[in-house]
Structure formats: structure tokens, C-alpha cells
Amino acid sequence: MDTKTWIIVGASRGIGLEFVKQLLEAGNQVIAAVRNVSAAPKLYQLITSQKAEGKCTVEQCDISSDESITDAVSNGMKLGNVVLNAGVLKYPNRATEISFSDFALHLHTNTIGPIICAQKLLSLSIDSPPPKIIFISSDSGSTTRFLDFEDGFGAYAASKSALNQMLRHMAAELKRSDQKKRETAILALHPGEVQTDMANIQIDWEVKGSIAPPESVSGMLKVIAEKGKADSGTFWCWDGRSYPW
């Protein structure tokens, strides 16, 4: 695993919190970004339990606010590895029923916010070795492997598909940019069917292969460690399988 400062956006619970836990256990410095620093008790409990006050900094970053993102990245941090995990799933979000505001919520939180956050982080001075920016995507966002049984996931799937397209453009643009930025790897990761608070919804089909956050994150960290600039603009599963766009 790369030993550098990791920036975890969306670190208050679930997958993001588990990233913080495993990275701290491995001896990394972590910047844990959360929407509301006064509403992240599990994160503070983790920092205290690991006696990691000097290893983990908590920053406020509301991924749905341009101003909040700008404030978060202007605190003198360097660009290390980044995991953009913040997201929303307001269920159900069917194409035949969803309101304008709920569709916009999914797009602002799952697509626009992560891309703008990555864009602004790329303006920072770069840590060494070259950074990797990881977008937590979803198999729901694959247009090649359309999951037609996922009733009520229209806006969520659309937001992840849009995210996938934008990060691919970001990777291609960086390859054409200056030498330092060209070293940055942009990756999409499907974390698996992870048991989290966000996924705790009542659905009408059986979820196969459900896994807990520790298994998902340990797998993703292995994938991240294996990938470099030659893999920029690619889509992977937590278990190392390539996933179709």
C-alpha cells in the first residue's frame, strides 16, 4: 500500500469510515472529510479508540456545496491518494415517479460534487509518489450490464453512469495535460453489495453476494495498490475483476 496522506471524502460512516479505520491501522495519515463535523460520532470514536489524533484530521466538506468543497481543499493539504465516497440513495427513485428535486439531489451528490471535488484537489501541489483518485461507483451505473431487476434505482443508476463518463473524460484530459498531472491515476471502483446504513432499505428482490464493509474495503485497497497511471480511466470491482462501463 502507498504510504502517504489519504483523503477520504464521505468518512462519517459505512465504507468511508472503514477506509479510515484500515488506513490508520496501516500507519497512514488520513484526512477524513465529512458533511457535518458535529454529526460524525463514529468517526471521532474511531480516532479516539486508535489513539490517532495526530494521524487523522477531520475536515468539513459537503459534497453538494461548491463553497464547502472550495473551503475544504484550501486548508493547505497536499494531493495524496483520494477516495471520493460521499453519496446518496433516496429510495425509491423510479424514472416514472421521481421529482425534479430528488433527481437533482442524486446528480448533485453522486455526480457533480465528486467531480468538482476531484477537479479542485487536482489544483493542489502533489504529494509523492504520484496520486490516485478513486471514485466509488456502482454496478448500477454500468450501461453495458444493465440491471433491469433493480426497481426504484433509476436516478441513482443515472447519477453513477454520469459519474463514470465524467471520470473517464477526466482521465483522458489528464493524460493530455502537463507532466505532473499526467502521473495521476483516475479509477472507478464498484465496492460490491455492502451492508451499510445507506443500503438498509426494503427491496423486492434478493441481494446476492452481500458483504460487510471490512471485506469490501480491504479488497478495494488491494486493487488501488495494484493500479497505476497506465490504468487511469478504468473500472474495477472490489475483488479485482474488471467491470464493463
Image (spheres, helix red, strand yellow):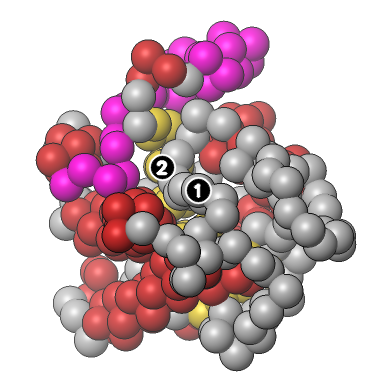
**In front of the other: label 2 or label 1?**
1
Instruction: Please identify the residue farthest to the bottom as the structure is shown.
Output: 144
Q: Which residue is mark 1?
A: 90
Q: Magenta stretch?
A: 41-66
Q: Is residue 133 above or below residue 139?
A: above
Q: Is residue 185 left or right of residue 70?
A: right
- Quote the CA–CA distance across marks 2 and 1: 19 Å
Give x and y (percent) for residue 142: 57, 79
Q: Residue at x 17, y 47 (%)?
A: 66
Q: Is residue 185 visible?
A: no
Q: Is residue 23 above or below residue 204?
A: above
Give x and y (percent) for residue 109: 36, 52
Q: Residue at x 65, y 67 (%)?
A: 151
**As shown in the figure, which amino acid type bears the numbered disc 2?**
Val
Give x and y (percent) for residue 228: 50, 72
Q: Is residue 78 left or right of residue 203?
A: left
* Quarter of the rendering containing residue 75: top left
Label 2 crowd (10 A; few <14 / some 14-19 / many >=20): many
Q: Is residue 34 left or right of residue 244?
A: left
Return the residue nearer the eye: 20 or 11.
Answer: 11
Q: Is residue 144 magenta?
A: no
Label 1 crowd (10 A; few <14 / some 14-19 / many >=20): some
**As shown in the figure, which amino acid type bears the numbered disc 1?**
Lys
Return the residue nearer the eye: 51 or 119.
Answer: 119
Mark 2 or mark 1, which has the lower sequence index? 2
State the quadrant of the C terminus: bottom right
Q: Is residue 9 above or below residue 46?
A: below
Disc 2, SS: strand
Q: Which residue is mark 2?
A: 9
Q: Residue at x 17, y 77 (%)?
A: 178
* Quarter of the rendering containing residue 118: bottom left
Return the residue nearer the eye: 49 or 139.
Answer: 139
